[in-house]
Image (tube, rainbow, N blue to C red):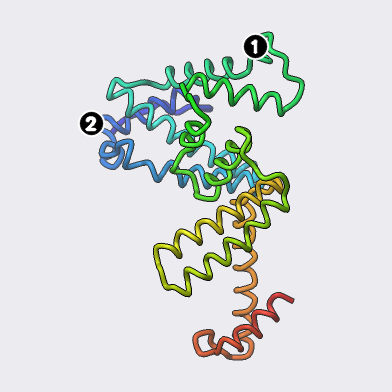
Amino acid sequence: MIEYPQKETYTIQDLREIVKLLRSPEGCPWDKEQNHRSIRNDFLEETYEAVEAIDLLDMELMQEELGDVLLQVIFHCVLAEEEQAFDFESVCDSICKKLIIRHPHVFGDVKAENTETVLKNWDQIKKETKQQETDADTLRSVAKSLPALTRAQKVGKRAARAGMDFASVQDAAACIPVEYQELQDAIRKQDSANIREELGDLLFSCVNTARKLKIDAEQALSESTEKFIRRFEKAEQLMTQDQKHMPDLSVQELDTYWEQAKQ
């Protein structure tokens, strides 16, 4: 048994010490077995839960979920410290230096009177510090681990900053029916590889249109998914009232209940 002092209030240093104790020979069997890769998905899950708390503007839940995210950060730092790669202090040091370097309009003599100039300067400094020689390098640097819609929108945004973009929302939206028709052609030919490619192109066109409209594609799809769930639930309730079972209904009957649910 490991004894740890009971306190009125704990600090970041306590969190670090607790994680180290969990990793110690007398600690938790599960914690001792973990490595950077094994807790990768835990980091993602905790981050998404924190984002949901932010969306709900639930301060109590946000405090809890941000703590879970912080635990993941500390856990990775402790693992890296054991490997003599880096520690929590070096992580703090690097992010502080990055913030100072990328805000020359605050910590230097560069003038930036609006957000557009700030972002332009940020991108240029980032390109220089990461030794990105071409605009294509900036596109490739967008993390592949991002959700596909988010990554597509971020790539499109960086391409636009480099000068490659649609002249208007209408031009971006005009690509949607074109890509849809190409998808229909691929479906008729029953070419599975081409179907996947054309479906991807259609989705990418939708994301570009969302970007031009200043709409977050990921959030828009998430809201539509929630709407679908609400309507599905209502349609199911209507079927239950009529003593009907979804698998037993025809497509036409399902459409009738769906339209009722939409109302």
Q: Is residue 27 left or right of residue 234?
A: left
Q: Please state the horizontal and vertical placement of residue 256, each as a whole percent of the image.
A: 66, 85
Q: Nearer the viewer, residue 134 or 70?
A: 134
10 Å crowding of disc 2: few (<14), some (14-19), many (20+) = few
Q: Is residue 186 left or right of residue 63?
A: left
Q: Which of marks 2 and 1 is nearer the N terminus?
A: 2
Question: Residue at position x 68%, y 49% from top?
Answer: 215
Residue on which disc 2 sits: 25
| Rendering quarter of residue 43 | top left
Residue type, mark 1 in image: Phe
Above-or-below relation of 41 to 115: below
Label number found at residue 107:
1
Q: In this view, does 141 lie to the left or right of 244?
A: left
- 204 in relation to 86, above or below: below
Percent coordinates x, y for residue 151 in the rendering = 52, 44
Q: Which residue corresponds to the image point at 61% horizontal and 88% vertical from the top-left?
A: 252
From this viewpoint, which residue is outermost toward the right?
113
Q: SS for tag 1? A: helix
* 63 and 187: which is toward the camera: 187
Please identify the quadrant where the N terminus is shown: top left
The numbered mark at residue 11 is none
Q: Residue furthest top?
A: 109
Kind of element beneath mark 2: loop
